[in-house]
């Protein structure tokens, strides 16, 4: 009779246990999605990550999953109690681009470089100069022709000049236009003067053209070319940083999904252990189980409580990391915001990868490669400048000028130079005006020229180093593409292996429960099998996370991560006004 009662008690306690761990039944393995074949002919895009954009069926599965296992149920049944924000992966990426502070800092670099590049053109701005003054001179007269005998000569000069000069871009020549005028009134030789005061105006143009040193590769023009290349390099640097932000956000999003799944598995494991403990205590009270088996069940509960605490802590850490990356300043010390990922945690797509095609795309799209090429171009400009500065100076200087002279006639006869100040301008275009033309050469040869020769040698080494770095980067890109492709293939195989292990572990747990019901096993053995199932489920979670990270990493290695997310660099480069900061541009 006692054995019958014990059997009835076992059956009675096994029913709630089976209900509590019903989710551990053999899972139905989802049909693998059809593999993605080679990229269609004519397409320039890499393989598209469809895991972030599940179809309607996947959305329904996600909603059912959320309803079955709420995300805000950490250890002890306590809820976060803060505001929740449901985000899909595409929304998280968009918000990350808008709010990421590191990306906001990087947005300034191209703008600063652009202003610097434009500033170098200032070396060719025309320069206007003007001077004017009045001079009065009085001195002793010692010339007997003008009277001598203690008389003093007085001279009064009012004059001024205006000029405009500029450097000519590329050529390195300089051009200057100058005009001037003066009024001179003097008593010296007054008895011999025919006009007094004397009005005179002049105009001239002067040009200097370098034939060796300074021709084309002069300092101002070299700075223009190198700054343009540096500006282009900062744009590529921003594109690289944008790719890194997108990769980081996607990785952190899927990490949050994985940590959420880990919490779910830990909660389910704890519920199973609690049910098993209740069953074991009941059987102990009726004398079917021993105290040792009760202690083993209690130890199993304690271990799973600890596992849940650790899983919850990792989940909250993943929350903070993702909030910081996508919302920036909205993460505060007292923040209670919680992001609820909406993408299906188990949806994935099989990829077929062509490493040769992936490497070719990387060579076209990787911003780091463009940066290295710009650096080589900049070093080539610097080498040309250094070689030019090694040459001797040979300049041609030419000038041409005209002048006109007029004054008040003080002679008894007619004077052709009788006229006003304004009449002097007309003399510029008549034979009555003055003419001046000159051409001269300027030669300067440095003896030894040690500094220039060593600067050329140094620049040649700099150029060779930048070319070697470019070759090294190409090899690094090939390694990254091959590594990314290999990791993705391994991750896809890992998901299949993890599914098989979950299936096997669930079957072993089911069999061990049956043995427990018939008294052929112990709660300790059941807990061991349950631990195997938990480990298998966590391996599957990790395999799915590794797969998604590998997809993101491969897109980054190919340089196609922005195209995959339809991100336009020019739109992302515009400065944002971020909450908590006051810096923004028009």
Image: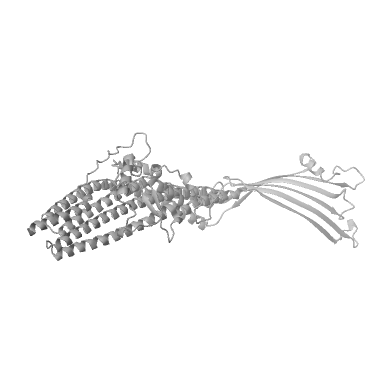
Image location (x, y in percent) of residue 351: 29, 41
Q: Nearer the viewer, residue 3 or 74?
A: 3
Q: Nearer the viewer, residue 554 or 167?
A: 554
Image location (x, y in percent) of residue 188: 86, 55
Single out the residue that lies furthest toward the front: 1
Q: Nearer the viewer, residue 100 or 516?
A: 516
Image location (x, y in percent) of residue 95: 43, 49
Kindly tell me whether residue 384 is visible in this rendering. Answer: no
Image location (x, y in percent) of residue 496: 23, 46
Q: Is residue 501 left or right of residue 156?
A: left
The coloring applied to the image is one colour
Single out the residue that lies furthest toward the right: 412
Single out the residue that lies furthest toward the left: 1
Q: Is residue 425 left or right of residue 570?
A: right
Q: Nearer the viewer, residue 314 or 9?
A: 9
Q: For residue 62, what is the image quadrant? A: top left
Which corner quadrant holds the N terminus? bottom left
Q: For residue 432, what is the image quadrant? A: top right
Kindly tell me whether residue 563 is visible in this rendering. Answer: yes
Single out the residue that lies furthest toward the top: 41
């Amino acid at each position: 009779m006692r054995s019958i009662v014990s059997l009835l008690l076992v059956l009675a306690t096994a029913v709630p246990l089976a209900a509590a761990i019903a989710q551990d039944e053999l899972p139905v393995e989802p049909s693998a999605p059809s593999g993605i074949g080679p990229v269609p002919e004519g397409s320039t895009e890499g393989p598209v990550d469809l895991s972030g954009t599940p179809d309607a069926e996947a959305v329904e599965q996600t909603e059912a999953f959320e309803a079955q296992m709420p995300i805000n149920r950490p250890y002890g049944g306590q809820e976060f109690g803060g505001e929740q924000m449901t985000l899909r992966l595409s929304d998280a990426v968009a918000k990350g681009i808008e709010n990421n502070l590191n990306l906001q800092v990087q947005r300034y670099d191209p703008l600063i470089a652009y202003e610097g590049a434009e500033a170098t053109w200032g070396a060719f701005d025309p320069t206007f100069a003007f001077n004017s003054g009045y001079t009065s001179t009085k001195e002793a007269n010692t010339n007997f022709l003008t009277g001598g005998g203690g008389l003093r000569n007085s001279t009064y000069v009012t004059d001024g000049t205006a000029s405009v000069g500029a450097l000519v871009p590329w050529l390195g020549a300089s051009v200057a236009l100058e005009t001037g005028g003066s009024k001179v009134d003097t008593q010296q030789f007054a008895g011999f003067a025919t006009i007094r005061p004397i009005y005179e105006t002049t105009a001239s143009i002067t040009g200097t053209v370098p034939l060796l040193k300074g021709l084309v590769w002069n300092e101002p023009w070299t700075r223009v070319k190198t700054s343009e290349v540096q500006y282009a390099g900062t744009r590529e640097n921003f594109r690289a940083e944008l790719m890194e932000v997108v990769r980081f956000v996607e990785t952190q999003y899927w990490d949050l999904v994985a940590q959420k799944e880990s919490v779910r598995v830990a909660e389910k494991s704890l519920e199973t252990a609690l049910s098993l403990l209740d069953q074991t205590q009941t059987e102990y009270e009726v004398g079917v189980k021993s105290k040792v088996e009760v202690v083993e069940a209690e130890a199993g509960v304690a271990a799973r409580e600890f596992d849940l605490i650790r899983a919850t802590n990792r989940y909250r850490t993943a929350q903070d990391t993702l909030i910081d990356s996508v919302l920036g300043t909205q993460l505060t010390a007292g923040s209670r915001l919680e992001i609820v990922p909406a993408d299906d945690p188990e949806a994935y797509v099989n990829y077929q990868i062509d490493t040769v095609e992936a490497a070719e795309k990387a060579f076209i799209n990787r911003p780091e490669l463009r940066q290295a090429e710009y650096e080589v171009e900049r070093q080539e400009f610097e080498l040309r400048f250094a070689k030019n500065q090694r040459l001797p100076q040979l300049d041609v200087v030419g000038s041409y000028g005209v002048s006109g002279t007029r004054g008040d006639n003080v002679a008894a006869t007619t004077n052709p130079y009788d006229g006003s100040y304004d009449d002097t301008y007309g003399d510029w275009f008549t034979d009555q005006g003055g003419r001046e033309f000159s051409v001269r050469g300027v030669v300067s040869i440095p003896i030894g020229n040690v500094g220039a020769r060593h600067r050329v040698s140094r620049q040649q080494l700099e150029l060779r180093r930048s070319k070697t770095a470019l070759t090294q980067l190409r090899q690094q890109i090939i390694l990254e593409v091959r590594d990314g492709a290999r990791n993705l293939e391994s991750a896809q195989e890992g998901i299949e292996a993890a599914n098989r292990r979950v299936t096997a572990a669930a079957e072993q747990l089911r069999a061990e429960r049956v043995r427990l019901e018939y008294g052929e096993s112990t709660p300790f053995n059941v807990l061991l099998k349950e631990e195997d199932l938990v480990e298998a489920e966590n391996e599957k979670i990790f395999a799915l996370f590794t797969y998604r990270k590998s997809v993101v990493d491969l897109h980054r290695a190919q340089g196609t991560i922005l195209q995959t997310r339809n991100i336009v660099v020019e739109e992302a480069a515009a400065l944002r006004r971020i909450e908590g900061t006051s810096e923004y541009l028009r």
